[in-house]
Image: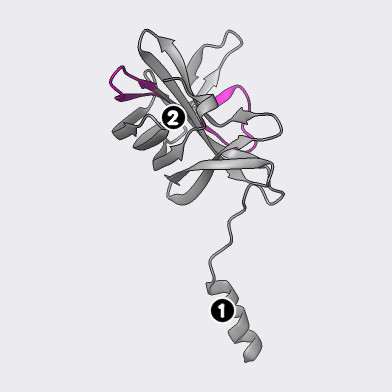
Amino acid sequence: MRTLLAALIVLALPVTAHELSDSFDVFGEMAVTLDGTEMVLPIALDLNSNASQAEIRPLYGKLRMLSVSGVTATDAGGWDAPIINLIIQIGGFGQGTLMHIMLSEKGQNKNKQTVANMEFGSMDLPEFSISEDGTVEFRFSAELVRTVLDSAYNQTLEEGQPPVKVIGTVSMIIPEAYRVK
């Protein structure tokens, strides 16, 4: 009886999420529901390669581009798929326009993409804020579609594949070295 009770208690405990190792400086998170599955994806700086999973770059004029990727931490402390990448155009007054979302899935062929952009799928950015200190917060939702790239990199819909629904929030403070003002 004690063994059964102990097993039930263990099963009732939440599953511990994996975390990135000390080789990463986590500065934000992407909390998403991906096709009904809730997950929290860290956004970090890789201290070994100095690569950031979020950055703001100049686009043209006063426009800037925010690229942010939420990654899945592995049990070894590294990162892997699923990865959700968003591209947001930031206007001169700090308003955001969602331009592209891509989901990288485990084992996904490089010629296949799961996306929403100006041509495929649908996406929404109902709330977006950015401050001078690099604090960025926003909500988003999208219906991603599966596409195929041919040898000339033309993108077409993959027939017979259902859309992938994603909703989420992002909260982060982008390190100064990875943002233009």
Q: Which mark is residue 81?
A: none
Which residue is more in the foreground, 3 or 109? 3
Do the numbered discs 1 and 2 sit on residues whose CB atoms are within 8 Å? Answer: no
State whether residue 10 appears in this view. yes
- Image coordinates of residue 133 in percent, x first then y, are 41, 32
- Identify the residue at horizontal 36%, vertical 19% (top origin): 118
- Label 2 residue SS: strand
- Identify the residue at horizontal 32%, vertical 18% (top origin): 91
Please identify the quadrant where the C terminus is shown: top left
Residue located farthest toward the bottom when viewing the structure as drawn: 1
Q: Nearer the viewer, mark 1 or mark 2?
A: 1
Q: Which residue is mark 2?
A: 145
Taking the image as shown, residue 11 lies to the left or right of residue 49, namely left
Picture quarter containing residue 6?
Answer: bottom right
Q: Which residues are magenta?
A: 89-113
Crowd class of label 2 (few under 14; some 14 to 19; many from 20; radius 10 Å): many
Q: Which mark is residue 9?
A: 1
Picture quarter containing residue 72?
Answer: top right
Crowd class of label 1 (few under 14; some 14 to 19; many from 20; radius 10 Å): few
Amino acid found under the numbered disc labelled 1: Ile
Mark 1 to mark 2 CA distance (whole Å) = 40 Å
Looking at the image, residue 96 lies above or below residue 63: below
State whether residue 34 appears in this view. no
- Identify the residue at horizontal 37%, vertical 7% (top origin): 61
- Image coordinates of residue 53 in percent, x first then y, are 56, 32
- Image coordinates of residue 47 in percent, x first then y, are 67, 35
Please identify the quadrant where the N terminus is shown: bottom right
Which residue is more in the foreground, 113 or 169? 169
- Label 1 residue SS: helix
Question: Per the image, is 94 magenta?
Answer: yes
